[in-house]
């Protein structure tokens, strides 16, 4: 080989033809490359007009060659079609070039806390299997282009942002070994996850807020909307975890999905509070018989006519005459044709006859009503009683509603819903702002992977 006591120097470089896929599930990556080694064996030097000889690969079995292997390699192989892809070249001074085409599959320890906005460093560690540093020393051939790529090479999942190489000594039980270490620093593409996970989750959360604009009496509609949103998020969450290992920590994607779950569940819990503490009626309008509507019309018309006559100091001879005069003054479309629709058009009135009353009768009715109404509780106190779950307050609201004619049939919006319409979107927007700032502005410091034989 060489003089006794002098280690053989093996210079190495790599030309990478393609790289990928990078698997998070198995924490490995693969690449197709030309792996070249240069060393000098003076026993093979020769003289003559030819400076370099290309030898058959059968000569590899007859000369010494380094026992190079990949410390973190998995299932690597040499291409053999149509013949073994190897090259052996000998120079006059005994210099040997040994090149081969390899597909290398190597381990890549990954930290997935920032997934899918993460940066990964995938190492490739090269060394001798049996020769110590005193016998064999590895060096990179060329400081700048020791590891290079063919023009136009890209990765489908990552961007290659940098690449570092170094020589080091690895110590194990048999002694010290010379090792070459190259690290590929990768930045993940987030476009796929934006389209498949983030945007659908945001839209589902926003869709669950539609329940804030649905009346509190529509129980099945609001509950069904929230439950559907939660189930859809569950499907997205399970699908997004398919290609990820079962790590012991939560990733950035997990935190986003968790917050989306919490917002959908909070929407459902918000309606539970609205339903339990503020809902006092079914929201349905009861059917009224024809006789009841006629009685209401007669009473309303009589009240309006009396008020008009009192104002003009001209009292008719009978209520019947006043009704006839009013009927001639107000067409059928405003009396009979308006009967069965007055509660729907003016739902804010508790009494259907209210729509027929003149302003003076409205005032007199208000005066009579306010005399028997209980004291008004401030909105702040009402919110506090709802928050602490005061059962006495809830039952009192039900009694008050049932005592007011027609009030329990009115569709209404809770104050809690009005607050939620603003609070939920604002808080979710703030969460998204902090989330994306935290993970996009976060920079991962490069660190070398420890060498394990």
Image (tube, rainbow, N blue to C red):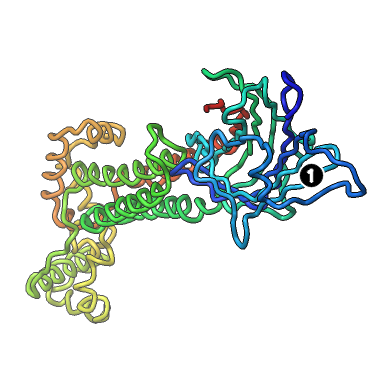
Residue named by callout 1: 90
Q: Residue at x 62, y 55 (%)?
A: 84
**Element under label 1?**
strand
Q: Along the line of sight, which residue is nearer the eye, 145 or 331?
A: 145
Q: How many marks?
A: 1
Q: Residue at x 23, y 71 (%)?
A: 341
From where the camera sits, is residue 104 visible?
A: yes
Quadrant location of residue 203? bottom left
User: Taking 93 as reference, is 85 left or right?
Assistant: left
Q: Along the line of sight, which residue is nearer the eye, 227 or 66?
A: 66
Q: Which quarter of the image is occupied by the N terminus?
A: top right
User: Taking 24 as reference, is 284 left or right?
Assistant: left
Vertical order, 412 against 318 (above or below)? above
Q: Along the line of sight, which residue is nearer the eye, 340 or 15?
A: 15
Q: Position of residue 122 (x, y in %)?
A: 58, 37
Dot 1 alpha-carbon crowd within 10 angstroms: few under 14, some 14 to 19, many 20 or more = many
Q: Position of residue 368 (x, y in %)?
A: 17, 48
Q: Along the line of sight, which residue is nearer the eye, 348 or 373?
A: 348
User: Taking 358 as reference, is 179 left or right?
Assistant: right
Vertical order, 44 against 87 (above or below)? above
Q: Residue at x 40, y 32 (%)?
A: 249
Q: Position of residue 301 (x, y in %)?
A: 18, 70
Q: Position of residue 452 (x, y in %)?
A: 52, 27
From where the camera sits, is residue 415 visible?
A: no
Outermost residue, right direction? 49
Vertical order, 337 against 402 (above or below)? below
Quadrant location of residue 85? bottom right
């Amino acid at each position: 080989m060489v003089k006794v006591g002098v280690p053989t120097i093996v210079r190495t470089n790599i030309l990478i033809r393609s790289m990928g896929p990078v698997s998070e599930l198995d924490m490995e990556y693969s690449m197709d490359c030309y792996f070249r080694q240069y060393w000098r064996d003076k026993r093979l030097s020769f003289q003559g007009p030819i400076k370099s000889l290309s030898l058959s690969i059968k000569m590899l079995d007859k000369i010494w060659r380094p026992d190079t292997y990949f410390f973190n390699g998995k299932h690597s192989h040499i291409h053999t079609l149509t013949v073994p892809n190897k090259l052996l070249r000998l120079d006059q001074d005994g210099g040997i070039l040994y090149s081969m085409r390899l597909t290398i599959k190597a381990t890549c320890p990954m930290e997935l806390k920032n997934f899918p906005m993460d940066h990964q460093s995938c190492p490739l560690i090269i060394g001798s299997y049996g020769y110590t540093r005193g016998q064999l020393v590895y060096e990179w051939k060329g400081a700048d282009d020791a590891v290079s790529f063919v023009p136009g090479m890209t990765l489908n999942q990552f961007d290659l942002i940098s690449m570092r190489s170094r020589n080091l000594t690895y110590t194990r039980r048999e002694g010290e070994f010379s090792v070459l270490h190259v690290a590929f620093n990768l930045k993940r593409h987030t476009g796929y996850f934006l389209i498949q996970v983030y945007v659908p989750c945001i839209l589902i959360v926003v869709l669950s807020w539609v329940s804030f604009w649905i009346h509190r009496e529509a129980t099945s509609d609001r509950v069904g909307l929230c439950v559907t949103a939660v189930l859809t998020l569950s499907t997205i969450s399970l699908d997004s975890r398919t290609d990820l290992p079962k790590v012991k920590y939560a990733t950035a994607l997990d935190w986003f999905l968790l917050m989306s779950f919490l917002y959908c569940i909070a929407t459902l819990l918000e309606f539970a509070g609205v339903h339990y503490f503020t809902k006092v009626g079914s929201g349905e309008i009861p059917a009224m018989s024809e006789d009841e509507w006629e009685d209401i019309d007669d009473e309303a018309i009589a009240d309006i006519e009396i008020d008009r006559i009192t104002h003009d100091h001209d009292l008719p001879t009978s209520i019947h005459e006043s009704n006839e005069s009013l009927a001639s003054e107000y067409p059928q479309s405003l009396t009979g044709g308006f009967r069965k629709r007055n509660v729907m058009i003016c739902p804010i009135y508790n009494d259907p006859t209210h729509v027929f009353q003149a302003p003076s009768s409205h005032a007199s009715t208000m005066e009579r009503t306010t005399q028997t109404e209980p004291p008004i509780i401030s909105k702040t106190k009402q919110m506090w009683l709802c928050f602490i779950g005061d059962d006495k307050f809830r039952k009192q609201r039900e009694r008050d509603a049932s005592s007011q004619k027609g009030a329990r049939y009115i569709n209404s919006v809770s104050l809690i819903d009005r607050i939620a319409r603003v609070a939920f979107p604002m808080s979710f927007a703030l969460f998204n702002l902090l989330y994306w700032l935290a993970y996009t502005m976060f920079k991962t410091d490069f660190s070398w992977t420890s060498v394990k034989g």
